[in-house]
Amino acid sequence: MAIVRLVRHGRATAGWDTDPDPGLDEVGLAQAQAVAEELRLAEAAVVLTSPMRRCRETSAFYAEPLGVDVIVDTSVSEIPAPLDVEMAGRADWLRHVMLGKWSELGDRYVAYRDAVVDRIRLCDQDTIIFSHFVAINTVIGAALRDDRLVIRRLDNCSVTTMEVIDGEISLVEGGSEAETLVR
């Protein structure tokens, strides 16, 4: 059995439609510091992060003071933007698809969902993963057998706790929620 804590990154400096890889703003840095303090009580054998800057910066607040190595793992990264949508249209696209289901999005996005879930199923030690709104919702959806993209309105730096037993994922506790602004 493994306890997997999925941490949504802190608030970013820019929106999805203006910067492909923003870091954390001042609020996001404070959120990252606060969640790092909360997580210090949780011992994790493995710490993973999305390669996206906002997740790496959030994870650093936890890992650096403890001298913990963080593994960058692309399988827990952000949902990929569509290839045919320009930067300025990405936020509108995301707002639209967040209302729907994975099965409506086609093979590329089902493969993304499956890669996220498969990575979590492989966790056999207590793990902390710094990831994204949609990716964490993907794992919650797998645990609840719910095909919607959005199950919970996860706040920045919320911690969602899952249990993995023999590759089966179950939701232990959902992270704190807030209205999420897709920008």
Image (tube, rainbow, N blue to C red):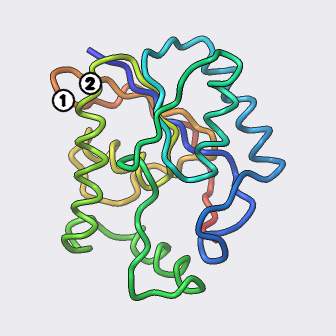
In this picture, is 25 found above or below 99?
A: above
Residue density around tag 1, few if under 14, some if 14–19, many if 20 or more, within 10 Å: some
Pointer 2 and pointer 1: residues touching (CB < 8 Å)?
yes
Residue 157 position, x and y percent, is 63, 39
In this picture, is 27 found above or below 63?
A: below
Q: Nearer the viewer, residue 73 or 146?
A: 73
Residue behind mark 2: 164
Residue behind mark 1: 168
Q: Secondary structure at mark 1?
A: strand
Looking at the rendered image, the quarter that the C terminus falls into is: bottom right
In this picture, is 18 found above or below 131?
A: below
| Tag 1: amino acid | Glu
Residue 12 position, x and y percent, is 70, 56
Q: Nearer the viewer, residue 156 or 70?
A: 70
In this picture, is 141 found above or below 180?
A: above
Instruction: Report whether 120 appears left or right of 58.
Output: left
Q: Nearer the viewer, residue 32 or 23?
A: 23
- In three-dimensional space, the C-alpha distance between marks 2 and 1, rounded to whole angstroms, equals 5 Å
Instruction: Report whether 168 appears left or right of 157.
Output: left
Looking at the rendered image, the quarter that the N terminus falls into is: top left
The residue at the point 46 percent across, 49 percent down is 152
The residue at the point 62 percent across, 57 percent down is 179
- For this orientation, the residue located farthest to the right is 26
Q: Secondary structure at mark 2?
A: strand
Instruction: Report whether 18 appears left or right of 101.
Output: right
- For this orientation, the residue located farthest to the left is 166
Residue density around tag 2, few if under 14, some if 14–19, many if 20 or more, within 10 Å: many
The residue at the point 42 percent across, 45 percent down is 136
The residue at the point 60 percent across, 20 percent down is 39
